[in-house]
Amino acid sequence: MKIKLIHSTAVTVAAWVMTLAFASASTLSTPQPQSALSLVKATAGGFSLSISNAGDQAWILQSSSNFSTWTEVESLQVYNGSFQRRYTNGAAGNLFYRAYYDAARQTNARTTANALVLPATSYNYAAPVLPASFSANPILAEDNMPANNLTTDAGATLGRALFYDKRLSTNQTVSCASCHQQAHGFADPRPVSVGFNGRLGSRNAMGLSNARWYQRKSFFWDERAATLEDQTLQPVQDPIEMGMTLAALTNRLASEPFYTNLFAKAFGSTAITTNRISAALAQFVRSIVSTASKYDMGVTNNFANFTASENLGRQIFFGLPGAPRATCAACHGTDNFVPTTGLNNNGLEFPYTDLGVGGVTGATNQNGMFKAPSLRNIELTAPYMHDGRLATLEQVVDFYDSGVVANPNLSPPLLGRNGTPLRLNLTSDQKAALVAFLKTLTDPALATDTKWSDPFNYGD
Ligand code: HEC
Ligand code: HEC
């Protein structure tokens, strides 16, 4: 357990910030705090209260002017690991405040109405407005939504709560969103992800924009999950990422009244099963659709909205006449910017430190091959590649320009005429143009739209 008192003088009115945090146990049971006491003195500026509590317990805020008589101010519920509130009315009686954990007072029900901040009418997840090219081949054939798990508004709403819920990790410190952050295109700004115990994984978390469209329909850098429904429960059980068992997960969720309600709305009955958890998570992930980028606007107006540099970058990317012919679109094709049916190696390294698809299938001609996720919102998802080795898009372009490494499985679009890795020899203007084009794939709404944001109630 740690208690922190921070005196903040940076703001015009002095304010005390009280922070209570409980180190979390790595057992399967809900982390339990010890009974605890912390003091804060309210001043003219009021005070801020912030509680970190992986066990999601109830706390009682009390005030006193003499340390002997304590008056209860209110009872506070932690819904998802933390709580924060600013109190502005502390000055009058020169009061002291304490937040107090009382095992006997753990009676607040976490209902859908108080634990989550959900809109009265559900967001539209089931029927996003899509550009014409998404309703025709080749993108239609890339759609991996199965007939037995069509996205519904209620299903994706449940999936949204699950995606942001730290209860999915054994010590209640990590949610899917810890590694798939909305502001970063649902990728992780850390080169490799950090799991519930602070241990490092070996790969960079992939961005999730338009994961719904990928013709091979498989997931992960090494494509080891055949479907998104298969994929969603793997991080939960991964010993580094979330460390849960499925039995512990269903038990824990079943003890939350708000989940009973969300499961009933999504699936017609209150049963909480692992199939339903994976289905709802998959619905939410598939709902993360991004089609409002500058590029999408350009498709409708013959790219009149593009700058000269962006248009030069587009010509290079698609290998259009009049520009150096990079072959990017051979592997990052269609308006969804994903490979079609083939697996690819883009010559990052040899020998391979990560066998990729070959490590799963055992086929040596698939060593070093990796899934390329959609390049949509690629500006937001740095760092790049399966191990996060490239920090910026400029480095990515430099890599494809002159850094592709010869190896037995290098994919043909990256081979030059003489069988050695393709060298693009771009000028610095052309490199900048390619970066500018990649940035036209950013959809400003993706990183901020509340329909994909954290729905939990954290106090203020
Ligand atoms: C500790 C970090 C971490 C957590 C927590 C986490 N992920 Fe991931 N996610 C990753 C990493 C790393 C990868 C790539 C792993 C690989 O390919 O081996 C990944 C890959 C994925 C992919 C594959 C995307 C694609 O295009 O193939 C999906 C989908 C996904 N995660 C969804 C989820 C969901 C849903 C949850 C919560 C149940 C979750 N993740 C929790 C780190 C995390
Ligand atoms: C032969 C197929 C192929 C070609 C051609 C190709 N790529 Fe890639 N690209 C891939 C693969 C495969 C990956 C994932 C590699 C990995 O992480 O090991 C990738 C990854 C990327 C990434 C990082 C994606 C992420 O989420 O981290 C970017 C950006 C990218 N490519 C841009 C380009 C550009 C720009 C070009 C043209 C100059 C290009 N690619 C040409 C196959 C290709």
Image: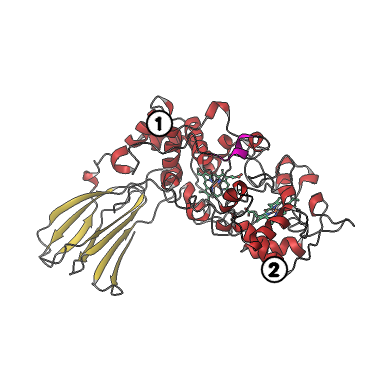
Q: Is residue 412 left or right of residue 71?
A: right
Residue 441 screen position, x and y as percent: 59, 53
Q: Eyeballing the image, is 399 above or below 369?
A: below
Of residue 81 and residue 125, the one placed in the foreground of this image is: 125
Asked if residue 79 lies in the magenta stretch, the reply is no
Badge 2: residue crowd in 10 Å (few <14, some 14–19, many ≥20): few
Query: Callout 1: helix, strand or loop?
Result: helix
Task: State whether residue 409 appears in this view.
Answer: no
Q: Eyeballing the image, is 139 above or below 418?
A: above
Asked whether disc 1 touches disc 2, contact meaning CB atoms under 8 Å apart, the reply is no
Task: State whether residue 400 appears in this view.
Answer: yes
Q: Is residue 231 left or right of residue 70?
A: right
- The quadrant of the picture occupied by the N terminus is bottom left
Q: Which residues are magenta?
A: 130-136
Task: Give the residue at mark 2.
Answer: 429
Task: Give the residue at mark 1.
Answer: 263
Residue 62 screen position, x and y as percent: 17, 56
Of residue 336 and residue 419, the one placed in the foreground of this image is: 336
**Amino acid type at image mark 2:** Asp
> Residue at point 76% right, 48% down?
367
Marks 1 and 2, how far apart at CA: 53 Å
